[in-house]
């Protein structure tokens, strides 16, 4: 970690200041284009575009960690959704249909550095695993053959987010709901939530009560306030109805308990 510098999400000024101070020493900027590891936090308007310009100006590589967002927010991931193209992209098990596999890609001049074309050796125990690759190819085929998929997921995410906001307000629970496509998080804080400090202002004890109440009603949420939830196209309208009804009851219960 001695060679890693951490900066706040959704704030370009610290990024500019760091590059002005040590731009020639910075190899790359790595981030989730939509944060998922502090709960769902979408990029503020202009944030990704600003990072693209700063890294380009200083000759640094911009890397998008699309392990969560790749093929989830759009067929081309968050970079397609927000119109910002990084130099490199990392992807996770979604490209294996949920099986253990990962991938990275980037500009040709970068990828030409990787063996066998270049001197950088990379290998893994499950590289090219036949089962994972077969499942991934089938997943990608299904995505390509369903042009309305992401519209459905966005509509479903928007419906759940709006219902959670309304239910929290009805229950008198201070809350913020962030949503991007099928990703969303109910933060137990008045918000807005746009970075890690504002996410950390959440009432985690109330979240724990809400989580347990939802579990009692047959809905298994991510067990941490700081994890994003994902909706699936496999969920029927009845499943979404049940989720919303359970959330309404659970928020009332969480509001009553000390």
Image (cartoon, helix red, strand yellow):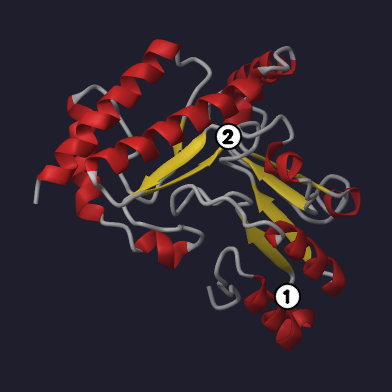
Task: Give the farthest residue toward the bottom.
Answer: 21
- Residue 113 image position (x, y, % from top left): 85, 54
**Nearest to the observer: residue 229 or residue 92:** 229
* Other-residue count near label 1 (Cα within 10 Å), few / some / many at <14 / 14–19 / ≥20: some
Residue 5's place in the image compared with 75, above or below, is: below
Q: Is residue 213 visible to us here?
A: yes
Residue 138's place in the image compared with 126, above or below, is: above
Name which residue lies at 38% across and 40% down. 165
Q: Secondary structure at mark 1?
A: loop
**Nearest to the observer: residue 16 or residue 247:** 247
Name which residue lies at 33% across and 24% down. 243
In the rendered structure, find residue 26 and report the number of the disc placed on it. 1
Between the C-alphas of marks 2 and 1, the distance is: 32 Å
37 relative position to 133: left or right: left
The answer to whether marks 2 and 1 mark residues whose Cβ atoms lie closer than 8 Å is no
Q: Quadrant of residue 212?
A: top left
- First in residue order: circle 2 vs circle 1: 1
Name which residue lies at 34% across and 25% down. 244
Residue indicated by mark 2: 181
- Residue 197 image position (x, y, % from top left): 42, 67
- Residue 213 image position (x, y, % from top left): 18, 33
**Nearest to the observer: residue 26 or residue 40:** 40
Q: Secondary structure at mark 2?
A: loop
Q: Is residue 133 visible to us here?
A: no
- Residue 95 image position (x, y, % from top left): 63, 29
């Amino acid at each position: 970690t001695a060679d890693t510098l951490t900066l706040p999400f959704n704030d370009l000024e610290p990024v500019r200041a760091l590059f002005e101070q040590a731009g020639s020493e910075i190899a790359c900027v790595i981030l989730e284009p939509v944060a998922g590891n502090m709960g769902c936090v979408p990029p503020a308007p202009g944030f990704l575009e600003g990072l693209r310009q700063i890294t380009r100006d200083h000759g640094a590589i911009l890397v998008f960690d699309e392990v969560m967002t790749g093929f989830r927010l759009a067929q081309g991931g968050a970079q397609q959704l927000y119109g910002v193209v990084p130099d490199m992209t990392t992807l996770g098990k979604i490209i294996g249909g949920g099986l253990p596999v990962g991938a990275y890609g980037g500009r040709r001049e970068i990828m030409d550095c990787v063996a066998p074309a270049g001197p950088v050796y990379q290998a893994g125990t499950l590289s090219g695993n036949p089962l994972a690759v077969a499942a991934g190819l089938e997943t990608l085929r299904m995505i390509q053959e369903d042009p309305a998929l992401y519209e459905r997921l966005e509509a479903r995410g928007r419906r759940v987010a709006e219902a959670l906001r309304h239910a929290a307000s009805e229950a008198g629970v201070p809350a913020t709901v962030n949503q991007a496509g099928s990703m969303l998080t109910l933060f137990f804080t008045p918000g807005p939530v746009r970075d890690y400090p504002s996410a950390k202002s959440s009432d985690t004890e109330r979240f724990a009560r809400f989580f347990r109440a939802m579990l009692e009603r047959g809905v298994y949420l991510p067990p941490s306030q700081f994890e994003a939830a994902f909706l699936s196209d496999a969920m029927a309208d009845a499943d979404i109805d049940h989720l919303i009804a359970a959330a309404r009851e659970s928020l009332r219960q969480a509001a009553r308990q000390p």
